[in-house]
Image (cartoon, helix red, strand yellow):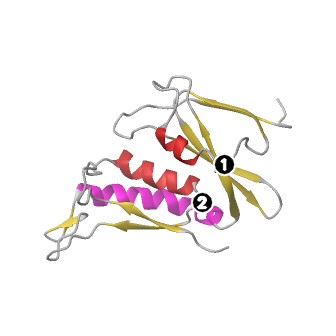
Amino acid sequence: GVGFGAYVQCFYGYSNLRDPIAYADFSFQVSTYMAFGVNRLSFYGYRDYGTESHLMEGGEPREKWYHVQKINTLIKKLDGLLYNFDWEGLYTNIGTGSFFATNEAFEAVKNDVLKDLDGVKSFKSKYDSIVGQFKDKDGRNAYMLVNYEEPSEVKNNKVTMTFEDADG
């Protein structure tokens, strides 16, 4: 299929956004992109001046560089799968332990998300989650689950999926 790419933000830019510095920041961005069917990523980290970047300083890797390296190593393990499945859509779920009854990001895409997951009888999570749904040429389903919480608030999500036609 055709590649669908995105830039992973490695700096806060010229806005009020916080600077992504932790591994969780990069993991959240990459996982979210992948749930949306992105299969080509670029890590944008240049500055407007000189030879410095947001990933390197004085020719030496910054801590962020190591986070990006770790993410790329994990993605490489999925290499054989990424192009074997076609993205079908995104499913959103407000977690049972979420502080708010709605999620602003989910509200922005509510008319464009899947109402149900193909092959899944039920889905619930402790915190807000998104699920990318994919299908291969033989009609088999695959899912990319993402804990859709603010990455600086380290919250381990508990997810329960019950599959249709599953034994046990």
Most extreme residue toward the bottom is 50
- Residue 108 percent location from the top left of the image: 52, 46
Q: What's drawn in magenta, residue-wise?
A: 63-82
Q: In which quarter of the image is residue 37?
A: bottom right
Observer-nearest of 158 and 104: 104
- The image shows residue 112, relative to residue 42, as above or below, that is above
* Amino acid type indicated by mark 2: Gly
- The residue closer to the viewer here, 149 or 104, is 104
Return the mark for residue 37: 2
Q: How far apart are marks 1 and 2 (CA)?
A: 10 Å
Q: Name the residue under label 1.
A: 143
Q: Does the magenta stretch include residue 66?
A: yes
Circle 1: residue type: Tyr
The spot of residue 8 in percent (x, y) is 40, 61
- Look at the numbered disc 2 and give the secondary structure of its residue: loop
Q: Comparing marks 1 and 2, which lies closer to the viewer? A: 2
Place of residue 62 in the rendered image (x, y in percent of width and height, measured from the top left): 22, 59
Quadrant housing the C terminus: top right
